[in-house]
Each structure stands twice: as C-alpha cells, then as structure tokens.
Amino acid sequence: MFISSALEKAMVVMAFSVLSIQVQLHAQHRKTQVLEKQLESVIAPYKATVGIAVVDIEKNEHFQVNGGRRYPMQSVFKFPLALCILDMVDHGRLRLDEIVHIKKEKLDKDTWGPLVQDHPDQDIDISVHDLLRYSVSKSDNNACDILFSLAGGPKKVNDYIHSAGIKDIAIVATEREMQAAWQVQYTNWCQPDAMAELLRLFFEGNLLSSQSNDLLMEIMTKSENSDKRIKGLLPPDVLVAHKTGTSGTNKDGLRAATNDVGIITLPDGRHIALVVFVSDFKGAPSYAEKIIAQVGNCVWSHFKNK
C-alpha cells in the first residue's frame, strides 16, 4: 500500500513537471511568434532580401526571420577578423603594441581608407592596436587587409571561427579581392543566426580573454560606422556595440549588401544580439538603413520593458 501511494505521488509530480515544461515552451513559442511576425511586418513593404537574427543573451532566447539563408557580409567580416587577431594576442602570437611597417606603395588609394587620409603619401608605422581601431571602428579596408596578412590569410580566420563552433560562415577573400570582381563578395557569406551566435559567444567571454573582450567591445561601442542603422531610431543614450558592412552597386544598379550587426544594452542591463543583413536591392544605402533602423526599433520596443 505504501509503495503504491509513493509511486502515485511520484507520477503526479512527474505529470505536473511535464505540464509545467509544456506551458513554458508554449509561452516561449508564442513570444517568439509575436516578435517574428512583427519583424516580418516591418520588412514586408521593402524590395530587398532581408535576414534577421535576434538573441536575448541573458535568457538565451533566439528569434529569426530568414535567418538560415546566406548573405554577403562585406565589412561585417572585420568583426570575426578582429576576434581572430585578438585570439592571437591572447596566445602570445601577436602583441597589441607590435609595430607594423607599411610601405606607401602597398596601400590602396582607391578604396575606403581613413588610414591613407590620415597618413597621405607616406610609409606608415602603426601598432596592431591601432590597426584594429582603423579596421573595426573606421572600417578601413587597408587596415583590414594588413590584419588578414598578420593572421595568415582569410582561411586562417575562417578556420578560427569554425573552431569556435560557428560553421555557417565563409571568410575566403580580402577587401582587395572583393573589389576585383563583383561576385567575389558573395563568397564572404554568413547566415544571420550564425552571426548572432558569434556575437553571443563573444559577449559572454567564451572566445577571448577579458582584456581583449573589453577592448573589442569598447572599439565597437565607440564605432564611427553609420549610426543610422541599428542605432537609427533608438534613444541617443542607448549603448550599441556594432559593425556595419556596405557594398557598392553593379552596372545594373543592384546593391549587394547594407548590413549591421551588434549588441544592444537594454535599460535593465540585459543585452540583445541583433543581426540585420539587407541584400540585393536597388537604391542608396539609406534605403536599407531605414529597414535596419526600423528592425532595431522593433526589437528595442519588444524587449525594453520585458
């Protein structure tokens, strides 16, 4: 009689536990559906291919719209490149104060280049630390390709990111190589949900030392990249650590990429990883920036009071 009673009690407890889990999963599913439908509504009027991924980092909740497709990254790939370089610093293969000598004839004057603008017609001696700032914060293409050289080439960076468990990304070409032919930029691709997961791993300190993590967060927060994208419709005091990417147009007026990826700090101190890739549309970057800003505002509004 005692055994039967104990067994019945255990079965009742188990039933309540299963029911509780089912209720929680149902609530999470409904919450996921609400945000995803809001995001679908935001992007519906636009003639562009848009991929979105969102991660509530502290709660480990994931949301996505077209998050499993491949999108050209353009300069967004300077974020994983920076992770690889800082990993090399953490393992003693590079030093932040290490000086790199660059001959002026090696610099591309026909690409986006604040580094050349700041050091016109001259050889440059610059630290790895400052190359990171130029590449990530100013999105300088020469600094980016110099960092690729220090890393051992795009394949080394790609292998490093894959070793971190992020498989749905391909880093195969430098900035100079992308500019050589239109289709090359599409070989540097990423799925939005993969980039959101990389942002989460970075923010949680799973990839770098705390010192390197803090440095890259600071560089991305003080970014000189466009503030009309994720930050475009957010209150001006909101902290966003981010990296943009922007392509040119081809002879048909098609623009391959206008992107922004980053980490938003909420009023209660929680953090949201947000990835918005806008691809294959006709128009100026401002067209896609409006999409990204509206997505950012939608995500902000969804989470800020939860």
Image (tube, rainbow, N blue to C red):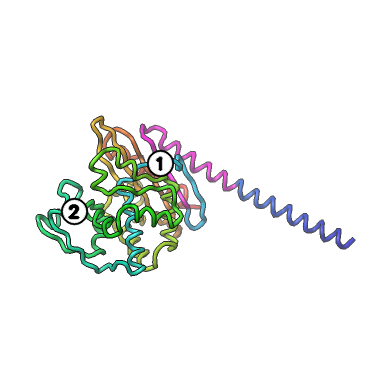
Give how far across and how far down residue 294 sits, in percent: 38, 42
Give residue 80's mark. none
Q: Considering only order in the chain, which callout, 1 or 2, is on the residue closer to the N terminus?
A: 1
Judged left or right of residue 124, residue 33 is right
Look at mark 2 in the image and give the residue it sits on: 114
Give how far across and how far down residue 18 sits, in percent: 69, 52
Amino acid type, callout 2: Pro
Give how far across and how far down residue 112 sits, in percent: 20, 48
Instruction: Please report the residue visible at 43 percent of the width from the left and 57 percent of the height from the top.
Output: 163
**Residue segment shown in magenta:** 27-55
Nearer the viewer's eye, disc 2 or disc 1? 1
Look at mark 1 in the image and give the residue it sits on: 70
Quarter of the image where the N terminus is located: bottom right
Assign a secondary structure to mark 1. Answer: loop
Compared with residue 217, is residue 69 higher up or lower down, i.e. above or below? above
Instruction: Please report the residue visible at 16 percent of the width from the left and 53 percent of the height from the top.
Output: 107
Q: In this view of the protein, which residue sits in the foreground, 192 or 103?
A: 103
Crowding near the residue tagged with mark 2, few <14, some 14–19, many ≥20 C-alpha atoms within 10 Å: some
The quarter of the picture where residue 248 lies is: top left
Compared with residue 128, is residue 30 higher up or lower down, i.e. above or below? above
**3D distance between C-alphas at marks 2 and 1:** 30 Å
